[in-house]
Image (cartoon, grey):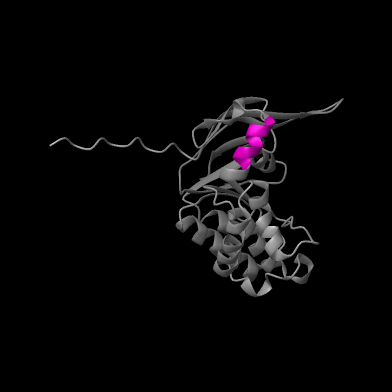
């Protein structure tokens, strides 16, 4: 009997090789990324620590397709995004990457439901599919009772839950998370880290950038950023 053919393995969700990024002014050139390489498999939890100015934010901006590297190769889900134009990169960013920021970046004059729905509207999802997805996310993240409220009416922890829900709205395979507990007290910060762990256990790859070594330690793969260079954390 003929054996079924094995299906090829899915590519890693992110592969970066030799990334170089410099910022230039009339008098100063700052090298933010120096030959940075990183591999994130599907469902992996990766953390990056480092001091302020080490290049962590620049790395996240390049990996998240918000900025382009001066040199190097970046592939998302097997796609060579380094070779794409701005419109294609925006499409990949919308469908494959969710962002969670330290300062939440919610829109104050939109309700919680409207904030969460925004990425789906940008991605062109059908209106009839948006409301059920919003309802599913607010229930999962424990903010269903706040869905008609506005960001200024919520605590910091609740706003970060909204931000995580928004990041998950388009069901991306990768979350890029920048200092998610920086504006929260320790107890609330712990709750947010637990939510990220649950999200990872549900199959999402997570790349966490943080100053907090205890939070970084929960990742299965840990890296240290120093002077624009990335290395395995000791």
Examine the structure image and report whether residue 92 is included in the region drawn in magenta: yes
Q: Quadrant of residue 57?
A: top right
Q: Give left or right: position of 172 versus 54.
A: left
Dominant SS of magenta comes to helix
Q: Quadrant of the N terminus?
A: top left
Can you give x and y, in whole percent of width and height, for residue 88 in the image? 63, 33
- In the rendered image, is residue 100 in sight? no
- Seen in the picture, residue 122 relative to 80 is either above or below; the reply is below
Can you give x and y, in whole percent of width and height, for residue 173 in the image? 51, 47
**Of 155 and 92, the residue lying toward us:** 92
Q: Residue sitting at 37 percent across and 37 percent down?
A: 9
Residue extending furthest toward the left:
1
- Seen in the picture, residue 5 relative to 192 is either above or below; the reply is above
Can you give x and y, in whole percent of width and height, for residue 44 in the image? 47, 48
Q: Quadrant of residue 56?
A: top right
Highlighted magenta segment, given as a residue range: 86-93
């Amino acid at each position: 009997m003929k054996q079924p053919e094995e299906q090829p393995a899915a590519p890693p969700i992110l592969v970066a090789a030799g990334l170089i990024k410099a910022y230039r002014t009339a008098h100063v050139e700052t090298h933010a990324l120096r030959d940075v390489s990183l591999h994130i498999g599907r469902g992996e939890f990766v953390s990056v620590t480092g001091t302020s100015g080490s290049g962590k934010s620049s790395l996240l901006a390049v990996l998240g397709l918000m900025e382009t590297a001066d040199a190097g190769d970046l592939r998302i889900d097997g796609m060579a995004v380094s070779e794409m134009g701005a419109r294609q990169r925006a499409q990949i960013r919308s469908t494959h990457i969710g962002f969670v920021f330290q300062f939440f970046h919610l829109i104050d004059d939109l309700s919680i439901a409207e904030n969460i729905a925004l990425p789906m509207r940008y991605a062109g999802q059908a209106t009839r599919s948006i409301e059920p997805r919003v309802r599913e996310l607010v229930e999962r993240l424990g903010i269903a009772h706040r869905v008609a409220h506005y960001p200024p009416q919520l605590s910091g922890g609740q706003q970060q839950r909204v931000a995580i829900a928004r990041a998950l709205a388009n069901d991306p395979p990768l979350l890029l998370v920048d200092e998610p507990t920086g504006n929260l007290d320790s107890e609330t910060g712990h709750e947010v880290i637990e939510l990220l762990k649950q999200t990872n256990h549900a199959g999402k790859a997570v790349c966490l950038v943080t100053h907090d070594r205890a939070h970084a330690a929960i990742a299965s793969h840990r890296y240290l950023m120093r002077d624009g260079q990335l290395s395995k954390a000791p």
